[in-house]
Image (cartoon, rainbow, N blue to C red):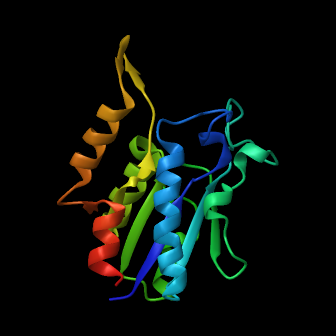
Amino acid sequence: MKKALLIIDIQNDYFKHGKMTLTGSSAASVNAKQVLETFRNGNLPVIHVQHIAARPTATFFLPGTKGAEIHDSVKPLETEKVITKHYPNSFRDTELFEYLKKNEITDLVICGMMTHMCIDATVRAAKDYGFGINLIGDACATKDLDINGHIVNADQVQTSFLAALNYFYATVTTTDEYLSKNLK
């Protein structure tokens, strides 16, 4: 077993004053940073995924903007892999799968944003490709959603998506639980 940390879309537009502010993005980034520092201290592989909007109607993660940059809390080191994506699924039309296979990575520890979109799509795809997955739920963030005029608050969205991914698709845990059990 060889594991890597996959940090998905922790980018400036998801934070206060960004173009798509999420609920809990600051707290999630603090937790992601703890996991990141532990991986760095253990000299374990780290992969950053950065979403750059390609749709003409996109309103955030626009190319060349400060909002599209990876947040300072998890800023990549020069030695860490950065993969650019244009779709919610981090595997779609990227080099992620080939990079993981080339480096013999079998297991992923995943955190990032948005839980209901890019995290969900990537976790499901990773499982379909045969990877073992630990999803750090409190190192992820989402937002309120609207369905037919009914607002589903971010806490409910977060809980629902994490619950749906738990067991078959991933082992969902907290930052403290993961670090205490896996990276002593």
Q: Is residue 100 left or right of residue 20?
A: left
Q: Residue furthest left?
A: 167
Q: Residue at x 28, y 48 (%)?
A: 162
Could one spot residue 131 in this view of the protein? no
Q: Quadrant of the N terminus?
A: bottom left
- The foreground one among 180 and 97 is 180
Q: Is residue 78 left or right of residue 45?
A: right
Could one spot residue 8 in this view of the protein? yes
Q: Quadrant of the C terminus?
A: bottom left
Looking at the picture, how far across and down is residue 168, in whole percent? 18, 60
Looking at the picture, how far across and down is residue 70, in whole percent? 67, 56
Q: Is residue 107 left or right of residue 45?
A: left
- The foreground one among 10 and 94 is 10
Q: Residue at x 47, y 41 (%)?
A: 24
- Examine the rendered structure and indicate whether residue 60 appears above or below residue 130: above
- The foreground one among 88 and 115 is 115
Q: Quadrant of residue 4?
A: bottom left
- Examine the rendered structure and indicate whether residue 39 appears above or below residue 84: below
Looking at the picture, how far across and down is residue 166, in whole percent? 21, 55
Q: Is residue 123 left or right of residue 6?
A: left
Q: Residue furthest right?
A: 64
- The foreground one among 36 and 148 is 36
Q: Quadrant of residue 169?
A: bottom left
Q: Residue at x 66, y 70 (%)?
A: 76
